[in-house]
């Protein structure tokens, strides 16, 4: 009697867990696919740029990069332009990169071979890396709500993982269990479960970091509007006052770099911004683990050489230390190419889980008189249109970074390889999404036909 009662209590667990898992997959799966699919390519986007653009590639060079001579070369090469940013080569086979604002307002990336000290080429700042970063992070802003919308999907991602535990019993024993079955549906169902198991750590990591981004965005939009602990801009908790000019001319970049190195001999300088609201700004890596470059930074008065602020990653509180770590974990940028490849592969697996879950739903509902989840076609249509609606923003973005001629914004000129890759990715993505929508709508049509016959 007691045994029968226990069984009756446990029976609803599997349907409830499975229903939650299915509901998330059917109604939110296509949006999750858009985010995970673009995020996978965002992880490897810098490497894709390296492959597509010959000017960014160099022969093996010494790891030590001479920022001082590089800035002198750039200033002599572009005397009428503003050198906004200088970035050291990320590895021995990449050129240094400078962001240069031209007299017409257009911004370009200019590449410099660290070995030969020669400029290898330039291009628009709209690269594969910039496209995927903007698309994955916020669908290019999506009229002010894009980032919040993307971050919000950390919740269904986590709930999808959690709900699977309720109906997939003894999951910890099934990491090497693949049931071929007699039908294609059985095989894909088993593959879906197996891929999900091996991706648990990755799903949890993406959900946790995504939830952090959601918290940051919510705090920024609805709270204190703070994104950094210390900076010269109002978005910082502690804003550094603008530097006072002492009547002296600005010190040479080489002198300011020497000051930075003498103050922070522990820091490997990776990026220099000569004019950050009046300050000479330097960031880089020290001996810290899992922090982005800006966790270590210097603000130097360019007239007096005085240090306005010196931040060490080790001095940050747990809260702000995690803020500097989340990006590294989210994109796998902590162990070079190896970690990025792992993140890329598991990102594709996560994208595939969204697709295979929807396909299984469609296949299992084909022989039923009425699909279990109504209005799934409407949800699919919305999920298709949301990323597509960012297209006009991309068009405006391309004109904004292209500069002006006779007071009119012009279209940025993209390298052929970059343009072809972005367009090709967009076409493939659209085909995948259309197949999803067609599959969902076919169930809707089937239901309508059956109801008419009845």
Image: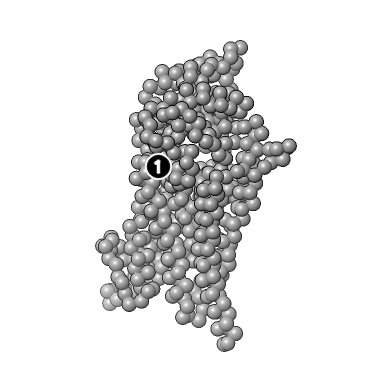
Q: Which residue is mark 1?
A: 333
Is residue 128 placed above or below 190 in the rendered structure?
A: above
- Relative to 8, is 429 on the left or the right? right
Q: Residue shown at 43%/70% (left/top)?
A: 360
Q: Is residue 183 visible?
A: yes
The one nearer the camera, 408 or 169, is 408
Is residue 106 placed above or below 41 in the rendered structure?
A: above
Residue 375 image offset from top left, x and y in percent: 56, 70
Colour theme? one colour
Q: Residue shown at 46%/80% (left/top)?
A: 367
The single residue placed furthest to the bottom in the displayed view is: 454
Q: Is residue 16 visible?
A: no
The single residue placed furthest to the right in the displayed view is: 406
Residue 444 image offset from top left, x and y in percent: 55, 75
- Relative to 313, is 377 on the left or the right? right
Dividing the picture into quarters, in which one does residue 51 lie?
A: top left
Q: Residue shown at 35%/71% (left/top)?
A: 187
Residue 307 image offset from top left, x and y in percent: 48, 19
Q: Residue shown at 41%/54% (left/top)?
A: 347
Label 1, secondary structure: give it: loop
């Amino acid at each position: 009697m007691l045994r029968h009662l226990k069984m009756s209590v446990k029976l609803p667990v599997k349907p409830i867990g499975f229903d939650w898992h299915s509901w998330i997959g059917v109604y939110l799966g296509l949006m999750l696919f858009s985010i995970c699919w673009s995020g996978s390519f965002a992880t490897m986007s810098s490497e894709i740029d390296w492959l597509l653009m010959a000017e960014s590639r160099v022969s093996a060079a010494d790891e030590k990069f001479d920022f001082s001579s590089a800035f002198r070369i750039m200033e002599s090469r572009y005397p009428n332009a503003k050198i906004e940013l200088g970035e050291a080569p990320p590895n021995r086979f990449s050129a240094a990169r400078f962001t240069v604002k031209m007299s017409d307002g257009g911004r370009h990336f200019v590449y410099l071979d660290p070995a030969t000290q020669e400029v290898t080429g330039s291009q628009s700042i709209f690269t594969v890396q910039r496209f995927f970063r903007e698309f994955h992070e916020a669908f290019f802003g999506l009229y002010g709500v894009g980032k919040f919308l993307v971050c919000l999907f950390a919740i269904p991602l986590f709930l999808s993982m959690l709900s699977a535990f309720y109906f997939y019993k003894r999951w910890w024993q099934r990491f090497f269990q693949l049931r071929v079955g007699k039908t294609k549906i059985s095989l894909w169902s088993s593959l879906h479960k197996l891929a999900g198991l091996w991706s648990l750590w990755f799903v949890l990591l993406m959900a946790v970091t995504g939830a952090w981004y959601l918290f940051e965005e919510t705090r920024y939009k609805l709270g204190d509007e703070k994104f950094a602990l210390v900076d010269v801009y109002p978005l910082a908790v502690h804003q550094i006052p603008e530097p006072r000019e002492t009547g002296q001319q600005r010190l040479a970049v080489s002198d300011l770099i020497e000051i930075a190195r003498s103050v922070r001999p522990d820091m490997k300088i990776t990026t220099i911004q000569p004019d950050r609201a009046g300050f000479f700004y330097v960031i880089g890596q020290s001996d810290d683990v899992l922090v982005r470059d800006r966790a270590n930074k210097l603000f130097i008065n360019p007239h007096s050489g005085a240090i306005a602020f010196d931040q060490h990653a080790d001095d940050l509180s747990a809260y702000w230390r995690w803020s500097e770590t989340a990006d590294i974990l989210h994109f796998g940028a902590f162990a070079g190419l190896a970690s990025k490849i792992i993140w890329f592969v598991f990102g594709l697996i996560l994208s595939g889980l969204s697709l295979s879950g929807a396909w299984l739903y469609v296949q299992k509902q084909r022989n039923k008189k009425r699909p279990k989840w109504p209005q799934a076609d409407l949800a699919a249509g919305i999920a298709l249109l949301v990323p597509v609606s960012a297209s006009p923003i991309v068009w405006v973005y391309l004109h904004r970074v292209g500069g002006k001629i006779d007071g009119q914004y012009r279209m940025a000129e993209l390298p052929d390889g970059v343009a072809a890759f972005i367009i090709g990715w967009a076409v493939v993505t659209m085909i995948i999404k259309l197949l999803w929508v067609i599959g969902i709508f076919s169930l809707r049509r089937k239901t309508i036909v059956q109801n008419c016959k009845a």
